[in-house]
Amino acid sequence: MEENKSKDSLNFVVGEEKDIAEILSAAEIVPLLGSLLRAGAAGAFLARDNGEVLWRSGEADGQAVAVRLPLLVEGEPVALIQVSGPEERREVLAAMAGLFRDTVQTILNTNLKRMMTTEIHTTVVNQSYEELLATNTLLAASEARYKTLAENLEKIVTARTKELQHAYVRLVQQEKLAAVGQLAAGMAHEINNPLGFVTSNLRTLDKYVHRFLEMLSFCRSSLAAPGLEELQEGMRREWLRLKLEPILADVDELFAQSLEGCSRVSKIVADLKAFSHLDEGESGEVNLNEEIDRALNVLAPQIPQDCLVKRGYTTLPGLRCNPAQLSQLIFNIIMNALQARPQGLQLVIETEVRGDFLAASFTDNGPGIPPAVQSRIFDPFFTTREVGAGLGLGLATAYDTITSWGGTIEVASEPGRGATFTLTLPLKRT
């Protein structure tokens, strides 16, 4: 916008003759693009309004979601930014794009104002001494504001990035809980119905077979009368040919084992459904010892055969909390121990009351945690596993959950001597 004043006034033009690459620099934009990738975006770039890319980071092409937002000067678009990633992270990507656009727009406006200030300074040097003093006072105040903004900009970006990371952790946690709930509901419906009539039929068949056995015993005793020796010999040969003696001895055990198997299947489904707390609300009273047992039952297929789990439980009072979140919290802690040592794992779980808190400790004999990374294990996306073995969200989710309740989670570890995770949960929460 061009402003024409009187002969003694200032004449300047803002935003007409300056290219976007003259206003912004790689030193300002490239670190912000890197922050987006660290926050979970697949790719991002900043381009002119004609589509020419100036700065790029990551792989923006071929992604399911690409969020584009314009950059404005005097209300006119002069450039655009794009943040790309997978479809399931659409909301997080939109938040990232908005934060990135706001930050770059702030830098853009600040740089424009600084350029304008330089032009003003060049003009006012020819003005009178009194006017120069007045203008200098205004410039000093303006410079102080811009300096403060520049110093705080990186802090603001870091804080917003951390907020996005925690938002993503909570989103993943909610998706996991929803998935477990849907799985439990589906399994309960699909398994319990056929399991019910199989169990009922086995019990009925057990009664029928025992009646057949009674009839067979009656016939055998009836043929023991004198004068039926030939019939008795024929029956004895058939009895031996059909191997009825071991069959009669095995019938009761076969039915008992079959009914026990049905009971075990029913218990597995019940444990999974109870673990997900599908039928409960966001708050309820639970027993911490029972929740740990349910998590172990759900994880049973992933626990190695040579794994030794020792339980040292203390009788505990009820704990009021979000049952589904508590299940997920315990699940993540135990899963972390299982991943620490695939073979020869020894896991000791102990619970106790500590004043107004419940405490649970999980001690494994894994390789331990190096001191250099102990302070980072609860950070979102941080993992010491191999690529593809985890997203680094299990412990971060556990930390986020327990601290939101006013509890604590601590780790004690020495390299080569395992690790102990200790949870403290408040019995009374405000």
Image (tube, grey):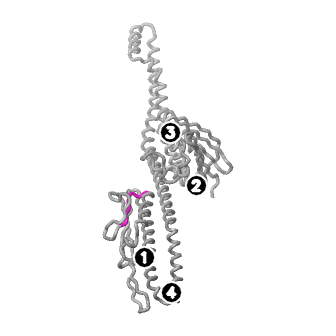
Locate the N terminus and report the quarter of the image it occupies: bottom left
Query: Circle 1 — which element?
Result: helix
Queried whether the magenta region covers residue 45, the answer comes back as: yes
Q: Are marks 4 and 1 in contact (CB under 8 Å)?
A: no
Nearer-N-terminus badge (3/2): 3
* Span shown in magenta: 40-46
Q: Using a 10 Å C-alpha cutoff, classify the residue at mark 2 as few (fewer than 14 neighbours), some (14 to 19) or many (20 or more).
A: few
The answer for how far apart the CA atoms under marks 3 and 4 are is: 73 Å
Nearest-to-viewer mark from 2 and 1 = 1
Residue type, numbered disc 2: Thr
Which residue is located at x 66 percent, y 46 percent? 353
Q: Is residue 173 above or below residue 7?
A: above
Residue type, numbered disc 4: Leu
The answer for how far apart the CA atoms under marks 4 and 2 are is: 57 Å
Which residue is located at x 54 percent, y 45 percent? 369
Residue 175: mark in rendering? none
Locate the C terminus and report the quarter of the image it occupies: bottom right
The answer for how far apart the CA atoms under marks 4 and 1 are is: 22 Å
Residue type, numbered disc 1: Leu
Residue 403: mark in rendering? 2
Q: Nearer the viewer, residue 53 or 97?
A: 53
Query: Circle 3 — which element?
Result: loop
Nearest-to-viewer mark from 3 and 2 = 3
Nearer-N-terminus badge (2/1): 1
Left or right of 2? Residue 121 is right
